[in-house]
Each structure stands twice: as C-alpha cells, then as structure tokens.
Image: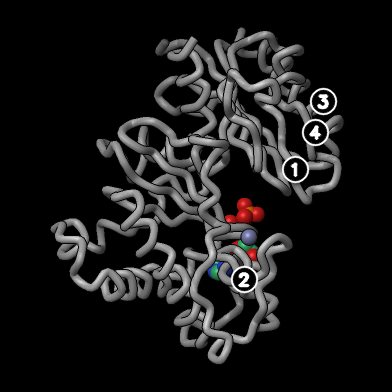
C-alpha cells in the first residue's frame, strides 16, 4: 500500500483538480482545468491519468469527490452519475462509467463534502473522531457527515445546505437565491447570497459590516439543528465564506447561546474553540479527500 499510486479527482462546478498521490497523502503530480461539458472535462481527466500511468507507473485505484447531487450507491443502476443539476449538460452524466471504461481500476465516488470530511478524518481536524460534520460555505452550501466511522449516504446523500431556517423577513427582507427553495440555508447564507443581498462580493464586506452578524445568525441556527440531530463530536466549517476571520468566533458564541445549555457536554460547553473549527487541510481538503476515497475504494473491493 505504501508504494501504491492513487488517482484523485476534486470535481467542482467551476474547476476540476486531478492528482496522483500516495497512501500517506503525498501528492506527486497535479493539474487543474475549468469544468466545461462532461465530454470534454472527462476526456481531459482521462488524458491526465493516462499520461501519469506512463510517467509514474500504474494507478491502483481512483477517488472522485464531486459536486452533486450524485448517486454514490454502488448497487444502484445510476451509480456514479450526476443527478438533476442546474449545471448545464451535467444532469445524468455518467462520471464513474466513463472513467471506469477508460482506466479499468476500482473507483470511489462521493460528494465533495463527504470526500473533504474523509480527508479531514485521515489527515486533518477530525483525526481520531468517529462522528463529525464537514460544511463548505462558498458558492453553495453543502454538508458531509461521518457517522460512527462511515460516511453517511442514506437515501441518496445528505443535503444539509438546503434545510429551511427561520427567516424573519421584517429584519431580513432578502428572499434568498436557491432556485429550488428560495430562502433555505444556501439561499440565505452562501457567498452569492451575501453578494446579492449586500450588492458587493462577500470578501469585500468590511469586518464590522452588519452582514457578518446576520450571516453568523443563520449559520448558528443551522449548527444548533445539526448538533441536536447528529450529535457530532466536532464541526468543520470550510469554503470561502468562513475565511472571514471574525465569522467562526461569532458562530461559536451564537451557537452556544442557541443551544441554551441543553447539550450537557464539555466539548460544547467549555471547548467551543475546538468544537467548531476551520479545516486543517484548508483548500487541500478536497483533493486529499479524493485521495482518501481512492484508498477506501480498495478497502471495499
Ligand atoms: P467554491 O464554492 O466555488 O469551491 P469558495 O469556497 O471559495 O469556492 O466559494 C466562493 C464564494 O465564497 C464566493 O461567493 C466568494 O465571494 C466567497 N468568498 C471567498 N473568499 C471569501 C472570504 N475571504 N471572505 C468572504 N467570502 C469569501
Ligand atoms: Zn435550497
């Protein structure tokens, strides 16, 4: 295993990152290109791995941490496909089938956020934990869950960015931007929601702008719900928006207040600074997660 080479794909809505790495997480080679049509994007992906097969040696398995919604159930007829997505051309795209036909190796396939969760479990902020949540708050909002040591799929996979939150329209008349639900968590609190509500990109809003109190309110309401629902040992907040340094401290304080001393755990009551945290792997969580998915695919064969 230590000398095996693994393929890793971080399939994003705007860019694909492809890499070859080893079991310890070391990346030997990496490339990135824009996500265009499935045909063109997957052809570039296949070409990269075929070149790497020649240059570095044969790959043992491949992991794909991909934008969704997608079908991660290996016993389903649509396993490895992208499901209905607003992203033009990608609804029904057979990502795993195409790569499997060209590369002929075991493939692990999961959501970007489940992948990032696995990466953080192996090499990052969730080492040693069996039940925790990983969120990305960026162009969209998504949540991945590891529950008792396994990534959670259930019916399809969690869609934690689309829960509905209490929305007091007298304080915040913004209707939200989710094309499906309007004012769900993603509709109210994603990066593009911030930009639309305040008329400027989120990263240009000053630290003392009222946007951040409101943003922290929505994130804290969601976190209170997910803490009660999943009993996570830790919550990791990744993506562009939580890179605002004042945001996570505000979210911790507001979440603690909303929990109202009901969850009687020292982790929550005394160690909030270690309970809601940024990812250890930062922007590397996605590709590290894909590498971990490749290894996991091998364990499951
Ligand atoms: P993606 O979701 O496309 O993978 P990101 O997680 O970086 O990429 O999310 C992009 C969104 O996050 C944009 O809406 C952008 O305005 C916002 N964003 C990026 N960096 C910051 C930052 N430092 N502070 C606040 N918002 C940010
Ligand atoms: Zn929604």
The mark that comes first in sequence, 1 or 3, is 3
Spatial CA span between label 1 and label 4: 18 Å
Q: Secondary structure at mark 1?
A: loop
The mark that comes first in sequence, 2 or 3, is 3
In the picture of the structure, the residue carrying the numbered disc 2 is 183
Tell me the mark number nearer the camera, choosing from 1 and 4.
1
Tell me the mark number nearer the camera, choosing from 1 and 3.
1
In the picture of the structure, the residue carrying the numbered disc 1 is 84
Spatial CA span between label 1 and label 2: 20 Å
In the picture of the structure, the residue carrying the numbered disc 3 is 43
Taking the spot 68% from the left edge, 64% from the top edge, the residue there is 178
| Residue 30, image x, y percentages | 63, 31
- Quadrant containing ligand 1 reads bottom right
In the picture of the structure, the residue carrying the numbered disc 4 is 41
| Residue 245, image x, y percentages | 42, 70
The image shows residue 292, relative to residue 205, as above or below, that is above
Dividing the picture into quadrants, the one containing residue 128 is top left
The image shows residue 234, relative to residue 147, as above or below, that is below
The mark that comes first in sequence, 1 or 4, is 4
């Amino acid at each position: 295993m230590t000398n095996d080479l693994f393929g890793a794909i971080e399939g994003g809505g705007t860019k694909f990152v492809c890499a070859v790495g080893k079991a310890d997480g070391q990346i030997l080679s990496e490339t990135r290109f824009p996500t265009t049509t499935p045909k063109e994007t997957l052809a570039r992906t296949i070409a990269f791995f075929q070149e790497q097969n020649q240059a570095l040696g044969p790959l043992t398995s491949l992991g794909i941490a991909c934008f969704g919604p997608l079908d991660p159930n290996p016993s389903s007829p649509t396993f490895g496909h992208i499901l209905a997505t607003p992203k033009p051309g990608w609804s029904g795209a057979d990502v795993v089938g195409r790569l499997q036909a060209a590369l002929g190796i075991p493939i692990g396939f999961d959501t970007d956020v489940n992948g990032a969760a696995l990466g953080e479990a192996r090499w990052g902020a969730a080492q040693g934990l069996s039940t925790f949540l990983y969120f990305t708050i960026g162009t969209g909002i998504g949540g991945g869950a590891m529950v008792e040591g396994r990534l959670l799929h259930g019916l399809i996979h969690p869609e934690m960015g689309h829960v509905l939150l209490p929305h007091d329209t007298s304080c915040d008349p913004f209707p939200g931007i989710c094309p499906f639900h309007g004012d769900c968590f993603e509709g109210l609190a994603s990066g593009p929601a911030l930009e639309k509500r305040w008329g400027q990109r989120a990263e240009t809003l000053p630290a003392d702008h009222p946007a951040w109190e409101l943003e922290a309110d929505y994130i804290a309401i969601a976190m209170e719900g997910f803490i009660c629902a999943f009993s996570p040992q830790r919550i990791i907040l990744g993506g562009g928006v939580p890179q605002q340094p004042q945001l996570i401290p505000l979210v911790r304080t507001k979440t603690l207040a909303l929990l109202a001393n009901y969850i009687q755990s020292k982790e929550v009551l005394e160690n909030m600074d270690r309970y809601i945290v940024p990812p250890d792997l930062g922007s590397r969580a996605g590709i590290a997660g894909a590498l971990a998915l490749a290894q996991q695919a091998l364990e499951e064969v």
